[in-house]
Structure formats: C-alpha cells, structure tokens
Image (cartoon, rainbow, N blue to C red):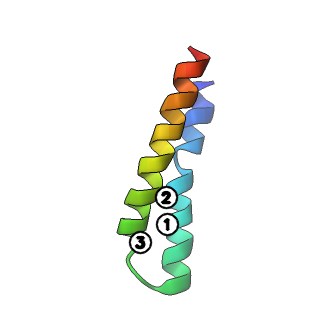
Amino acid sequence: MLSIFAILSDIPWYIAEIISKITGADASAILDFISGGYAEIMDAINTIIK
C-alpha cells in the first residue's frame, strides 16, 4: 500500500514537467502549489486507511 503512495507522490512532478516543456517556463511555483494540495490529500487518505 505504501508503495502505491510513493508512486502517486511523483504525479505533481510529472505535471510540472509537462507544463514546463509546453510553456518553456520554470515550473517550480506550479510544482509547489500542486504538491502542497496533493500532500494534504495523501495525508487525509493515509489517516482514513490507518
């Protein structure tokens, strides 16, 4: 189960890389925004599963 969370935690990085390649802009701000929200969702799921 934890390995699934580890794989899913890379999703924000993939999204930021795609946006960076499309726009050519630095995606660090986008990555921070997405990963912050994503981390909250993963924490909530982890709390529910425990």
How many angstroms separate mark 1 from mark 2 (CA)? 5 Å
Residue pushed farthest top? 50
**Compared with residue 43, is residue 24 higher up or lower down, i.e. above or below?**
below
30 sits left or right of 14 in the view: left
How many angstroms separate mark 3 from mark 1 (CA)? 5 Å
43 sits left or right of 32 in the view: right
Q: Callout 2, which amino acid?
A: Trp
Q: Are marks 1 and 2 in contact (CB under 8 Å)?
A: yes
Counting from the top left corner in percent of width and height, residue 18 is at 56, 72
Q: First in sequence, mark 3 or 1: give its number.
A: 1
Residue 13 marker: 2
Determine the residue positioned at 63% across, 34% down. Answer: 4
Determine the residue positioned at 57% across, 34% down. Answer: 5
Counting from the top left corner in percent of width and height, residue 50 is at 56, 14
Residue 27 marker: 3
How many angstroms separate mark 2 from mark 3 (CA)? 9 Å
Q: Callout 1, which amino acid?
A: Ala
Instruction: Please name the residue that numbered disc 1 is placed on.
Output: 16
Task: Decide: few, some or many residues near mark 1? Use Cα within 10 Å; few <14, some 14-19, many ≥20.
Answer: many
Q: Are marks 2 and 3 in contact (CB under 8 Å)?
A: no
Determine the residue positioned at 54% across, 25% down. Answer: 46
Q: First in sequence, mark 2 or 3: give its number.
A: 2
